[in-house]
Amino acid sequence: MIRVMLLLCVFATSSFAADAGKIEFNRDIRPLFSKHCTACHGGVKAAGNISFVYRDKAIATGKSGEKAIVPGKPQASELIKRVTSTDPDEVMPKPDHEPRLSEQEVATLTKWIEQGAVWTESWAFEPPVELPLPKVNQTDWPRLPMDRWVLAKLEAEGLAPSKAAAPAEWLRRVSLDLTGLPPTLEDAQDFLHKTHQSPSSHKPYEEVVDRLLKSPHSGERWASMWLDLARYSDTFGFEKDPHRDIWPWRDWVIRAFNADLPFDQFTIKQLAGDLLPNPSGDNLLATAFHRNTQNNTEGGTDDEEYRTAAVIDRVNTTWTAWQATTFGCVMCHSHPYDPFPHRDFYRFAAFFNSTEDTDLNDDFPRLPFPDDAAKRDEMARLAQEQTKLREKLNADGSSLAKMKWQPWSPKSMSTTGGELKPGKDARIDATGTLPIGVVYTLSMPVVQGITALRLDIFPDSDDPKKWPERGSVLSHLKLSVKHADGKAEPVKLSDVFADFLAGPFDPQATLTDDANGFGGYPVLAGPRWCVITLDKPLPAAAGDTLELVMEQKAASNSGFQGLPLRHFQWSISKDERWPALATNEQRKVTTARLNEVRAALNKIGGTNVPVMVQRSTNAQRATRVFTRGNRLAPDELVEAGIPELSRPPEKQHDLTRLDMARWLVSDRNTLTARVLANRLWAEMFGRGIVETLEDFGTTGARPTHPELLDHLALRLRTTHKWSVKTFLREIALSATYAQSSKASLALIERDPKNTLYARGPRTRLTAEMVRDQALVVSGLFAPKMFGPPVYPPQPEGVWNSAYSGAKWNTSTGEDRYRRALYTYAKRTSGYPAALTFDAPTRDACTARRIPTNTPLQALVSLNDPAFFELAQAFAKRMTAHGTTLRDHIEHGCQLLTLTKPSSAMVETLIKLHDNALKEPGTDEANAMALVANTLLNMDAVMVR
Amino acid sequence: MNHQLLLHQTRRHFLRDCSSGLGALWLASTASRAWGASGPLKKDPAHPLLPANGHFQARAKHVIYLHMAGSPSQLELFDYKPELKRLDGRDCPMSMLAGKQFAFIQGVPQLLGPQYEFKQHGQSGQWFSDRLPHLARMTDDLCFIKSMHTDQFNHGPAQLLMHTGSQNPGLPCAGAWATYGLGSDNQNLPGFIVLTSGGKNPDAGKSVWGSGFLPSVYQGVQCRSQGDPVLFLSNPEGVTRSQRRLTLDALAELNQRTAAEVGDPETLTRIAQYEMAFNMQASATDAFNIQQEPAHIHALYGTQPGQESFANNCLLARRLVERGVRYIQLFDWGWDSHGASKSEALNGGFIDKCRSVDQALAALIADLKQRGLLDDTLVIWGGEFGRTSMQENRGGKKMALTGRDHNPLAFTVWMAGGGVKPGYTHGSTDDLGYEAVVDKVSPHDFHATLLHLLGFDHTRFSYPVAGVNMRLSNVTKPGSKVVKEIVA
């Protein structure tokens, strides 16, 4: 028994041979450096100025004055001297860190240096290459080139493929893999009949795969995979974890998979659909991918902190999902193992740093997405026109503002909170406690003929590195003239023109009595100015005083941080062109159209979904390197860019998010195709060719079949032009996939994790499949697609978030029996049954679910009332078939396994039924429900 | 060993042997590999909670962590500041405000003196306000850290930092680390159990007891005071325990055949997991039945069976420790004394909160002690940050009720048992109780110390994730250290 347990649990460690022949850097040397050296001599710490991550630093002269590596001369290389030294002060690795290198490892290093210390970048950063197909002996086995690569390796290992799976085994597996649903008995009977008729024909298999890929349910199954990467959730996350309407994006993903939208388009639309020329409604909707970031609405949380957190999350998610690269490391320092310098992170972050969203409680910006596609396009056109019209109207004034202004100091000033003091020039500084809603009142003698006022808002610091700071917003300006007799007369203001338009507020709101207005909101990222115009020059009489009442009601950080003006200055103009703007005919036409567009947008209906909206050119945010990843320690400015290591596009400057998205799916990119091919392979085989789906870097797993991976990547990208369905079709019809999953003890012992594919895959169902399979066999399955999330039964009191009144109102009717994909996904309180079966919380991008096997899972599938309800329905379905107990049970087994059960199996279940019935108070229905409950928990049913 | 022999491992045989036989053999064969070399711990997939040892002898075998969610005011409970009393009502000096960020305070707030009377207690002479008279009697068992500080000033992120070492969701919490490293002494209960009171889950939601990148079997299992203590523990309506036994016997027969036919070792694991679930149904139901306790114990704790209360959870925590559960995490919600409403004012809800925990806290320590469990059970009490020395002035306005804003610069945590010095105080704050100044302790130092007490060198207790050996004590900000002074 000991041996059995050992063989189940202890996995063989790989070793490489320092035998004759050429040393290969990536295979033989880099793992040695990573294992023994780079913790101290790496990308984070380069002790003694030596790093084994960058070649130039490895061959440079270190602090000791010696060269670690002298290509061709091991005896002159300090590296060899140190690893062979017997002096405890000299030897590397240091004795208290690591044991000595083995003789074999030293020999490998020595030989590598002798051969010239050839250094190549990690395989993942070299382009994939299509190698000539290998020779194999069992030539009648492969159906596809991919099978040849698998077989070649098996033969090299002295193994042979397993025989083909029985048609029923293959059908159940392929149905669950491609659609996430088990086949119906009718589908199975049809297929089994055909394979029985013509056992050697491949056609029935092809028909099945084509039928499955055509099923609208396949889009749902593959969307499930993508939602983990996208960290899709129906809530914001964090404390209150409020509801977020972003399910229309989830539906877009389902439709995209169903339409087999090529993955390059799928990528570009999600990352930069808003930047495509004249984007369609769906192009805008697709960008909600990166609005699945969390939003913190907890009272008093710093909006800028969580805006930055969302930007960082977008960088990390993009690199994990498309590049399987642990780019997050580079946030704080250069990558410890792969040659990405620290600033690369921020160069890449700059692609995401200038969108309008800024952790506001209403999830701004959102756009309304109607259910109808044509209406969505109409909405997209209107939204873009609205932006253009607003820009145009504002430009009339902002271009005119480049004139000389006369600074204007008040004679007296007062405030309802804190203190106002004259500052340098005509500036005014406000200090002390400035509560939300603080009002400043300034007055001075009226100057004849004023036509416009200019407000300049200044930050606390002149140092751009200290920006952005707390916001600064004038929410309402009231102007009046006080005559000598004490009577006050309001002055009519006509327009507000801003230096630029950004954020949720329309500067015009400065003229109305709400909290919206002009300024830096929620943060001030540098000086701002606006011009407020009068509709006619202001007349002046002796003794007239002009009074400015400045209200500051805006608040950030979920409404708790006041945003008063702290440093500001007023100037005046008497230029006649300002009042002329109010009567300009062209402006009237534009304004009328803007009003029409706004009205049409308000009327269009649909669901408001958060999307990516790029700020205008003059409202771009500066991106700085954060020292050690600390947002509060910004350093040098950087321009948007792609790491050198990752073969950036030729265009070097002014790269946009769209350029970045196109680069990801371009032929220059060495990773996207490999990462996707590997992911799809893993979904079908339960394990990637690179096991670490999330990490293709130096510290990730090495591909078990590198040539196969490259072949698949190129097949996907070039041959199939990114068609996911065509690619999946090939895998499903391959000889490798067709193998039976049955394994001899010898094979299990030889290859416990099935890394060689000498047998077919056998993987536990995903959390979604566990529910969906039970739904289908119970007969209760509601195939309804799309729409808002649903609430299948969950125990009372599971939702209990702080400061949230959200209630779980259990769905009735068909919504109670929808696929798991549509179950409400709340970040701080996931659906318990799904979490127990390893579904992630969707806090962050999850590239791989690690399947577990725990008693809590057994409690779910045995006892969860939602699950038991399906068992009861399944029991009824069984009872309705045939006349004897044996008939019922056989039918139940067949619904699940697609084959006629063995008599032993039926006997076991009959015994269970009969014994259960002996319990007092148990009726026939209860006993059958127990049989159904048992069937649904069988190992053979919990796996695919 | 042949195939037949493998399959001969019948269900009961498999289980009966799991802790003394099979599992022990498995452990013995791999123990030498378990520590030292990098890489994840080698775990028996069928018994991932088998007990294991840390790097060295543990001082604490169990942890009961009492988290007062919302963060109680240290200035009204333990950190006595006469100088603050003297300056009550004065404008806060600018030096205390420059460069500081607050959740709600605006501009220049006023200092607020301690709201309750303080007295020294016991031989150790430690200070308590009059809000915790029962706990004050246990003073000579308590070990205070008065110099805790954090860098998070909002609840969700600060709670995450206190439990996972990071303010962002998605990392394993201390309980998950402890259970991963040490397993649990009871295979029929989850190794890491979470109990909540106060009517709400903590602000950070279930992420504070998540397992992050560790296998999900190490995440906290939230047990409930209403309905099943563990979700889905009860059989469905109409299914009796003996019928459940019948179904599991049938299931085992069916699965044995599958194992014989297909040869997938996971099938045998699944059989074992179902058996464990069956045992858990009995043992968890028993563990959570506090009605079994005698009247004098209920009197000691102030417990009333059937209610959701902190006192009930304290009693449950003791019962779970008795049964070998490794890590018990309590959250009690409602300590956020801003003064913005009566229920969360220092002169309102705070009084009730103190009353609702005082007796149970004292009872828990006394009860563990009288059963000889306190020596190897570490009890921890604290919030996620402290409270300001200033009266809150939400929106820049004067508030009618008394309250304090969040203060990341100073807070108090106390511990008892499990290898910490009894009757001892570590660290201190400035004269106004605003900032920790002497022997400061960060959440990462706190984690390093917790792991030390559990028998781990925090720098070596790691799990490889995407190329980094991640640790509870934070790899990205090295320098966390064990607070040796508090170790007995």
Image (spheres, rainbow, N blue to C red):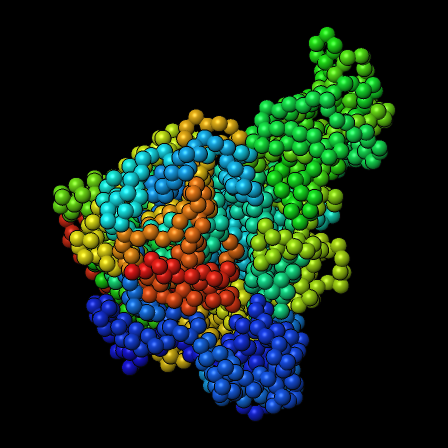
- Locate residue B440, reporting x and y percent: 43, 53
The residue furthest top is: A485
- Give the number of callouts: 0
Q: Nearer the viewer, residue B433 or B269?
A: B433
Figure quadrant of residue B26? bottom left
In the image: residue B296, left or right of residue A303: left
Figure quadrant of residue B57? bottom left
Residue at the (81%, 15%) spot, across then down? A540
In the image: residue A481, left or right of residue B98: right
Q: Nearer the viewer, residue A731 or A85?
A: A85
Residue at the (48%, 65%) spot, across then down? B465
The residue furthest bottom is: A20
- Locate residue A631, reporting x and y percent: 59, 51
- The C terminus of chain A sits in image quarter: bottom left
- Locate residue B296, reporting x and y percent: 13, 44
Residue B154 in view = yes
- Locate residue B390, reporting x and y percent: 46, 36
**A695 is higher (above) or lower (below) than B380:** below
Figure quadrant of residue B441? bottom left
- The N terminus of chain A sits in image quarter: bottom left
Residue at the (25%, 62%) spot, across then down? B185
**B410 is higher (above) or lower (below) than B212:** above
Q: Nearer the viewer, residue A613 or A499?
A: A499
Residue A350 in view = no
Residue at the (36%, 66%) spot, across then down? B456
**A838 is higher (above) or lower (below) than A760:** above
Q: Nearer the viewer, residue A445 or A870?
A: A445
